[in-house]
Structure formats: structure tokens, C-alpha cells
């Protein structure tokens, strides 16, 4: 198998993570009133256990957990930081708007990847793409009262911060490509434990009362907050992170459509226009990367 075919296969595997993430907002919204850190703790422990299950068959793979402290800081910092912010955003802001702001992370990945080894810096097309993405976010707020007294403003800020955290984690992961994907299981377990500590300190436990809410939490842990991380790690480390960045813009479109179809968000022209601008911005940035 050639290097190009291996890269293509890894990139395709990364696409699987993007498909799973289209369900993240839906399952989170359907999980009921579970506080964000409690929800992160449960789902990350499920996701970590999913990865550790392989160690039962191949005990030698557990050696992947022996990583330098900087690698653990990157893995746990990226996973814990991003999801704590994202779950908080979905609790404090409307799911569709918070999700679309958060989906600036693919564009940020494209921009940040310009400084990866072998890249040739930032071009005008990257800047144009970034401005189009920002315009798409700005349209979400058009005609609304979004002063600093607005209740949803903290949710929007948390969503934007999450975008920067995830983009940084993804691009830096590409720089530590020798770290086995099995190490992600340890990152998930550590993130689950940190989330549990934060829950016990800052929150009051709220347990779902309906079977559908419990099902949503389990599905979160197995898919968007579980298997997706392992797939994404393979894609970022061995595939084309720029292609993954632009492909990730299918996620906000599909995610928003799912929210509208299930009644968690209204169908508004602003949402569609925002999606179109953000996707167009990503395409501009990727084209600039390929011609650099």
C-alpha cells in the first residue's frame, strides 16, 4: 500500500467521525436536564471504556497509555476543555445557534494547518475564507437583541471558545503522529474523571427520568463522545487534516437539519444562509492551501 493510499484511507476514516458528530447536538438536547459536567463525565467514561475494551483482547496495546506529560496535557486538555465548553454552550444558548458558532472549528483547522510542517503559510484565500465564516456567524445575530445583558451570550462565548480549543487540539495532534490512537482511551477516561470532579464541586446531580433520555446519553458515549474520537485521531495523524477540515463543514448543515426535523430548532432562512457562507469560506481556504 502506498503512502498516498494510506493517507486516503485515514482521511476516509476521519470522515466517519464527522458523520457521528452530526448527532452530537441532537443527543445532547435529548438527554434532558443533566448538568453539563455530569453529562460529560458519564459519556466520556463510556467512550473510554469502549476504547479499553480492546485491551482485553490485546493487552499489549495498553502500553499506548504510557505517554509523556505534554501528550497527556494535549489529549486531556483538548477533550475536556472542548466538551466542557460545548455542553455548557448547549445549555445556555439555543442549540442551532450554539452549534453553528461552534462549527467555526473546521475553518480554524484549515487556517491553523497552514503552519504545519511542509505547509507554506497563510495566503489571501485563507483570510477571505475566514471572513466569510465570520460573516456566516454574524448573520445568526442579525436583527436580534444581543447586548451583553442577553441571557444566551455566555452560551455563544462558550461555543466560540470551544471552537478554538478543538481546532488547536486537532492540528497539534497531527504533530504527534507517532502517538498510538489507543492512547485516546486514556484521555477519555481522564476527561471523564475530571468532569466528575467538576460536577461534584459545581453542580447538583440531575438524573434522567425517561428511558429516551438515558438512551441518548448512552448513544452519546458510544458515538459522538466515543468512537468518533478514535476515528478523528486516525484521520488527523495519518490523513489530510485540511481535507478533514473542509469536510467537517457538512456536519453543521446536517446537524442543523436534524435539529429542525426533530423540533429542537425552528427552520429560519438565517440558518441556511449561515451554513452556505461558512461552507463557502472553508472551500476558499482549502483552495488556497492546495495552491500554496
Image (cartoon, rainbow, N blue to C red):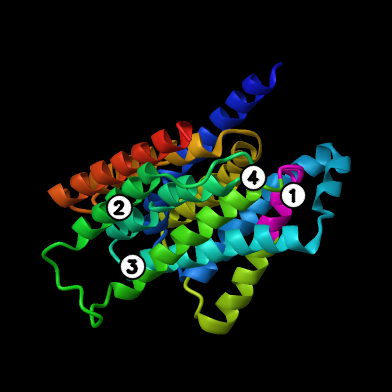
> Disc 2 vs disc 1: Cβ atoms closer than 8 Å?
no
Residue under numbered circle 3: 156
Residue at 44 percent across and 66 percent down: it is: 161
Is residue 145 part of the magenta span, yes or no? no
Q: Is residue 203 left or right of residue 174?
A: left
* Closest to the observer, 2 or 102: 2
Crowd band around label 2 with a 10 angstrom C-alpha radius: few (<14), some (14–19), many (20+): some
Between disc 3 and disc 1, whose residue precedes?
3
Between disc 4 and disc 2, whose residue precedes?
2
Residue at 69 percent across and 50 percent down: it is: 184
Seen in the picture, residue 74 relative to 215 is either above or below; the reply is below
Nearer the observer: mark 4 or 3; the answer is 4
Q: CA distance from mark 2 to mark 3?
A: 18 Å
Q: Is residue 247 left or right of residue 218?
A: left
State the quadrant of the N terminus. Answer: top right
| Residue 149 location (% of width, % of height) | 23, 83
Residue under numbered circle 2: 131
Between disc 1 and disc 4, whose residue precedes?
4
Residue under numbered circle 1: 183
The residue segment tinted magenta is 177-189
Residue at 58 percent across and 42 percent down: it is: 232
Amino acid at each position: 500500500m502506498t503512502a498516498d493510499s494510506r493517507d486516503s484511507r485515514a482521511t476516509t476514516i476521519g470522515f466517519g467521525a464527522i458523520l457521528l458528530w452530526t448527532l452530537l447536538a441532537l443527543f445532547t438536547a435529548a438527554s434532558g436536564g443533566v448538568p453539563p459536567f455530569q453529562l460529560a463525565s458519564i459519556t466520556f467514561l463510556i467512550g473510554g471504556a469502549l476504547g479499553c475494551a480492546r485491551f482485553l483482547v490485546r493487552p499489549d496495546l495498553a502500553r499506548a497509555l504510557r505517554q509523556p506529560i505534554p501528550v497527556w496535557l494535549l489529549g486531556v486538555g483538548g477533550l475536556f476543555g472542548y466538551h466542557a465548553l460545548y455542553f455548557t454552550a448547549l445549555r445556555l444558548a439555543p442549540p442551532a445557534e450554539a452549534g453553528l458558532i461552534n462549527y467555526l472549528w473546521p475553518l480554524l483547522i484549515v487556517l491553523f494547518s497552514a503552519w504545519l510542517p511542509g505547509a507554506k503559510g497563510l495566503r489571501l484565500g485563507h483570510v477571505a475564507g475566514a471572513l466569510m465564516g465570520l460573516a456566516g456567524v454574524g448573520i445568526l445575530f442579525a436583527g436580534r437583541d444581543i447586548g451583553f445583558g442577553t441571557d444566551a451570550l455566555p452560551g455563544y462565548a462558550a461555543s466560540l471558545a470551544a471552537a478554538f480549543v478543538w481546532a488547536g487540539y486537532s492540528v497539534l495532534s497531527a504533530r504527534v503522529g507517532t502517538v498510538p490512537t489507543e492512547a485516546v482511551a486514556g484521555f477519555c477516561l481522564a476527561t471523564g474523571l475530571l468532569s466528575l470532579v467538576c460536577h461534584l464541586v459545581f453542580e447538583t446531580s440531575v438524573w434522567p427520568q425517561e428511558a429516551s433520555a438515558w438512551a441518548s446519553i448512552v448513544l452519546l458515549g458510544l458515538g459522538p463522545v466515543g468512537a468518533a474520537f478514535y476515528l478523528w485521531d486516525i484521520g488527523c495523524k495519518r490523513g489530510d487534516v485540511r481535507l478533514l477540515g473542509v469536510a467537517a463543514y457538512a456536519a453543521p448543515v446536517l446537524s442543523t437539519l436534524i435539529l429542525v426535523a426533530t423540533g429542537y430548532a425552528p427552520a429560519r432562512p438565517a440558518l441556511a444562509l449561515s451554513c452556505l457562507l461558512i461552507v463557502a469560506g472553508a472551500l476558499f481556504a482549502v483552495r488556497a492551501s492546495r495552491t500554496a
